[in-house]
């Protein structure tokens, strides 16, 4: 690992996780969901992730592994790691019941008329917090490993993940608030669920550091690309279309790709 990038990587991962707190603040102070803005933002996040995954992470991993192992072997290993990342993300998602999945997005309007059973509400909020914690581990690993290798790339990924963490903060805080009438408690649980991002980064640092040869690092980055592609197609784009018009999410997707392309060229 590039040691001077490690602190930057931890900070970026922490900031991405803290975005769940922004979701809590929106839930407490906004009266309605700005559906078009949220749709565009989620599409933008997906565009950044998809472009980075295919153009930077997978392509970079293939190039490095081809130099070390030869073109065919290196390309095969990079592709295997990429699809391995997709499988890992899919398995994590599969283990979570749809009813408790925080990526089944909810609008503020729908959550301002919750069921009257406070115990059910509390369970809903705590289950969502637990599920987000599980989901955010690979996202923390993705942000951290990318930022260690390339801090500019890490910034882009951290921003994309932060955008998609905002609705998760809403999903945690609103049911807990209605169950307890305590904004501090609702914010606390939302905040704690977001902390799984830096925890994932810490685990990546502790587990991967002893084994981080150029081959392993390339495989990890390719797998990170796979994770982000799955998140984009399984979570971000469906949620973006649900919150707004189809074209708005596509405009956001294209804008995210364009911004990422320009930043990679200019930085």
Image (tube, rainbow, N blue to C red):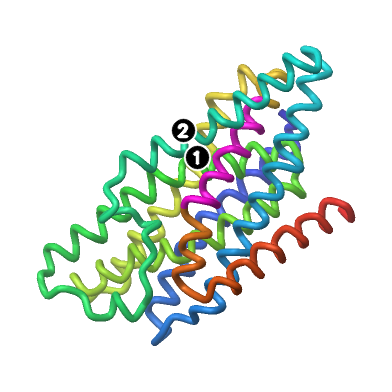
Q: In terms of depth relative to the viewer, which is nearer, 128 or 206?
A: 128
Kindly identify which residue carries mark 1.
138
Choose top left, top right, bottom left or bottom right for residue 176: bottom left
Residue 262, position in %: x, y?
84, 58
Q: In terms of depth relative to the viewer, which is nearer, 97 or 122?
A: 97
Q: Which tag is nearer the camera, tag 2 or tag 1?
A: 2
The span picked out in magenta is 219-234
Instruction: Give me the residue at 67% from left, 25% from top.
Output: 78
Choose top left, top right, bottom left or bottom right for residue 134: top left
Bin the neighbour count of mark 1 within 10 Å (Cα to Cα): few under 14, some 14-19, many 20 and up: many
Q: Is 116 contained in the magenta span?
A: no
Answer yes or no: do the residues labelled 2 and 1 have beta carbons within 8 Å?
A: yes
- Find numbered disc 2 in the image and state the secondary structure of the residue it sits on: helix
- Find numbered disc 1 in the image and state the secondary structure of the residue it sits on: helix
Instruction: Give me the residue at 41% from left, 64% from top.
Output: 169
Instruction: Assign the N terminus to one quadrant of the image.
Output: top right
Q: Is 226 contained in the magenta span?
A: yes
Kindly identify which residue carries mark 2.
88
> Against 67, is 38 above or below?
below
Residue 194, position in %: x, y?
44, 54
Bin the neighbour count of mark 2 within 10 Å (Cα to Cα): few under 14, some 14-19, many 20 and up: some
């Amino acid at each position: 690992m590039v040691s001077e990038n490690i602190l930057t990587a931890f900070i970026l991962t922490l900031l991405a996780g803290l975005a769940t707190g922004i979701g809590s603040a929106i839930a407490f102070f906004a009266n309605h969901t700005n559906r078009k803005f949220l749709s565009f933002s989620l599409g933008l996040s997906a565009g950044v992730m998809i472009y980075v995954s295919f153009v930077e992470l997978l392509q970079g991993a293939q190039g490095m592994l081809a130099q070390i192992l030869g073109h065919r072997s290196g390309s095969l290993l990079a592709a295997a790691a990429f699809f391995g990342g997709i499988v890992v993300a899919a398995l994590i998602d599969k283990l979570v019941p749809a009813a408790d999945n925080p990526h089944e997005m909810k609008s503020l309007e729908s959550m301002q008329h919750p069921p009257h059973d406070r115990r059910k509400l509390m369970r809903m909020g705590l289950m969502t917090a637990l599920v987000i914690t599980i989901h955010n581990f690979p996202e923390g690993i993705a942000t951290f490993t990318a930022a260690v290798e390339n801090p500019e790339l890490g910034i882009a990924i951290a921003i994309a993940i932060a955008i998609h963490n905002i609705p998760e903060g809403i999903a945690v805080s609103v049911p807990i608030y209605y169950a307890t009438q305590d904004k501090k408690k609702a914010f606390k649980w939302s905040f704690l669920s977001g902390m799984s991002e830096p925890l994932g980064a810490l685990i990546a640092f502790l587990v991967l550091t002893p084994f981080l040869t150029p081959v392993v690092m390339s495989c990890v980055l390719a797998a990170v690309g796979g994770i982000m592609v799955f998140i984009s197609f399984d979570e971000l784009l469906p949620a973006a279309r649900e919150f707004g018009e189809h074209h708005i999410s596509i405009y956001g997707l294209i804008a995210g790709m364009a911004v990422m392309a320009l930043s990679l060229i200019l930085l």
